Amino acid sequence: MGSFFVLTVFTAFRFLNRNRLRSGLTTVGIIIGVGSVIAMVSIGEGAKFAIQAQVASMGTNMILILPGATSVGGVRGGSGGAVTLTVNDALDLQKKVPTLHETGWAKRDVMQIVYGNQNVNVPVNGISPTYLTIRDWSFTSGGPFTEGEMETTSRVALLGQTVVDNLFVPGEDPVGKMIRIRNVPFRIIGVLAPKGQSPTGNDQDDIIFIPFTTAERRVLGTQFLGSVGALFASTERPEDLPAAVEDIQRVLRDRHRLQPDQPDDFTIRTQVDIGKVQEGTGETLTIMMFSVASISLLVGGIGIMNILLVSVTERTREIGIRMAVGAKRRHILIQFLAEAMTLSMVGGLLGVGFGILGAQATTIVAGWPTIISFEAIMVAFLFSAAVGLIFGIYPANKAARLNPIDALRYE
């Protein structure tokens, strides 16, 4: 039985070799389909990895609390649409939520920064010292400001790497230099380590940090002292995040004197939530790309069925002779299925090679991270084999059902 299958496959290769151009064109659809599936899935996996890295750059076990989400005139506003959070909220959360490791706060505005004859528009953030700990931000030179410097509204600043690149010549150490923010002089005391893009696509290094008190009293201004643009918190362990969110919601509702039928006037987001949203978007995109690429495999399957139907017509007399000398219907059926499977599997192997090359080319040319998945390779290859089997059944069955006498008479 084994020798029969080996002979059948050998015969299939021999018949396909007779019409190399036709066989090659038939496999193009399979090659494109398998290659596209592997390349698209690799790009999708690379995007997922990049998103995970971006979310990780936000900090460790971070909780973000935004003001807003209030109902005004029957319309529910978006987060950040009202001033509802204060420094005292953060301090109270630190006291009343035992699972919180740190709490911090920040407010921001885009302002013109001047150094010598250079000037750029940069987001200026007034922050508490704990903000840097929560965001897990380190330094390439210098260091952070202290609680004492915040209490005395010191004019000190921390610069992101993008700001340094835009204001200073390469190799120049910004620490100790003076910049002006809204005509207020600030001394640079630290340069932040690069973090890259955020999950929303913003450059996290295009930023300046100054003490919160200095920001609200000398630079940014405020509707009332102590109002913040956002609160930040962190927990010791990731598993503490759900309990911390519930406690934060309870404490803030009590502090803001919200009735049970009133909605929250704040929005809580965790690092896990942000990551899930971004990964969900990436997975949806991967599924869409996989679906589009799969269409090429189906088109390739139709090509295989078409070429085998032509082959049945061309080899009708040959089929009749084989039946006349003792070949059974199942032998003819297996022969044509073997030819279909051979076409699809050869196309699948070539498609795997082109898919891997395409993924690597994407990384080199576009700089997009790609991760070649062995599971995707196996699924795409097996899918191509299945396509050959499914689309080969009809022409193989047609050949096997030929009447030997009619087949011998066929010209």
Image (cartoon, rainbow, N blue to C red):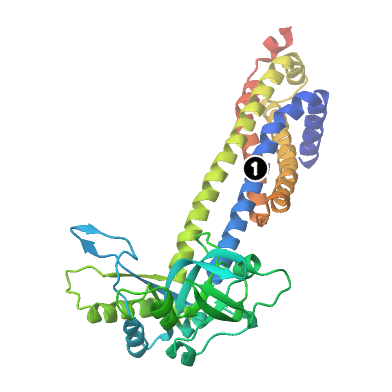
Residue 22, percent from left and from top? 75, 24
Picture quadrant of residue 259: bottom left
Picture quadrant of residue 351: top right
Residue 120, percent from left and from top? 56, 64
Please tell me whether residue 53 is drawn above or below residue 354 in the rendered image.
below
Any part of residue 60 in sight? no
Q: Quadrant of the N terminus?
A: top right
Q: Exactly how many numbered labels are in the figure? A: 1
Asked which secondary structure carries label 1, the reply is helix
| Extreme residue toward the bottom, this view | 148
Along the line of sight, the residue nearer the viewer: 84 or 237? 84
Along the line of sight, the residue nearer the viewer: 20 or 158? 158
Please tell me whether residue 28 is drawn above or below residue 174 in the rendered image.
above
Task: Give, as a three-letter code, the residue at label 1.
Answer: Ser
Please tell me whether residue 161 is drawn above or below residue 365 in the rendered image.
below
- The crowding category of the residue bearing disc 1, from other C-alpha atoms within 10 Å (few below 14, some 14 to 19, many at least 20), is many
Residue 201, percent from left and from top? 53, 59
Picture quadrant of residue 16: top right
The answer to whether 35 appears left or right of 76 in the picture is right
Q: Name the residue located 56 percent from the left edge and 69 percent from the top edge.
A: 114
Residue 74, percent from left and from top? 18, 58
Q: Name the residue located 22 percent from the left edge and 62 percent from the top edge.
A: 71
- What residue would you read off at disc 1? 36
